[in-house]
Image (spheres, rainbow, N blue to C red):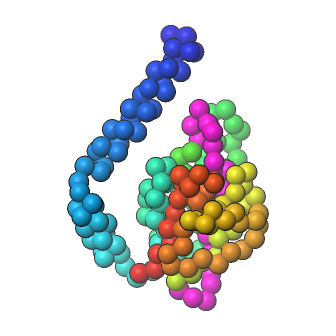
Amino acid sequence: MNSVALAVLIDAMRFQCRLRELAFFEPSSTAERLGRIAASIERLSAGRYLIGLGPNCNELIRVGAYPIRFGRHASVLEEPHEMIIDYAVNDASLHGPREVSRYHCTIDPTTSIDSECVLIDEGSSTGTWLQPASQRIEPHDRVTITHGAMFSLGPSAANLFLLIAV
């Protein structure tokens, strides 16, 4: 199979897989989905959490006492990165474009208020953005975020996170 035929196959399958993913995870009514989400939140112990809301970041991350570094793994076309990341967003496909830098941003929980954290863009190529206002954080600035704040890795908001305190 030549590269063009292979590209056509890959493109079609990626599109179909995304449609199947949506059909599998969202077959229920809005009320059922909201009930499942609320039940999950009620089971959490007290603390701060980041909820990934995008297709490449849909996990629940407990924010403990230490900073959390976000980024992505190197693709097969890139050299490995020396920096260690704590949470990898699966944004390193062969097909690009990429929004998540290999060392993108850090959440620093070491504030005096239990419902807030500090968000730091680590010089990422596409920026860390406060949502829904689409406000870009300047590289290396320390921005305090609180319960209910959302930020994205890149401007598209496809890699979106919500900070909650329960």
Please state which of residues 43 and 138 is positioned toward the viewer in this rendering.
Answer: 138
Residue 76 lies, with reference to residue 67, above or below; the image says above
Above or below for 62 versus 1 = below
Question: Hey, which quadrant is residue 68 in on the image?
Answer: bottom right
Seen at 75% across and 71% down, the residue is 141
Residue 62: x percent and y percent? 47, 70
Q: Position of residue 154 (x, y in %)?
A: 63, 54
Side (left or right) of 98 relative to 36: right
Residue 109 position within the rendered picture, expressed as x and y whole percent measured from the top left = 59, 77
Q: Is residue 155 left or right of residue 16?
A: right
Q: Main secondary structure of the magenta part?
A: loop
At 50% from the left and 10% from the top, the residue drawn is 1
Residue 125 included in the magenta stretch of the image: no
Residue 141 as seen in the image, left or right of residue 45? right
Q: Residue at x 63, y 43 (%)?
A: 98
Along the viewing direction, whichever of 88 and 134 lies nearer the viewer: 134
Is residue 35 shown above or below 113? above
- What residue is drawn where x is 67% and y is 32%? 77
The quadrant where residue 133 appears: bottom right
Of the pair 44 and 95, the residue shown nearer to us = 95
Vertical position of residue 21 compared to residue 83: above or below: above
Please provide the residue range marked out in magenta. 92-114
Q: Is residue 108 magenta?
A: yes
Q: Looking at the figure, which quarter contains the C terminus? A: bottom left
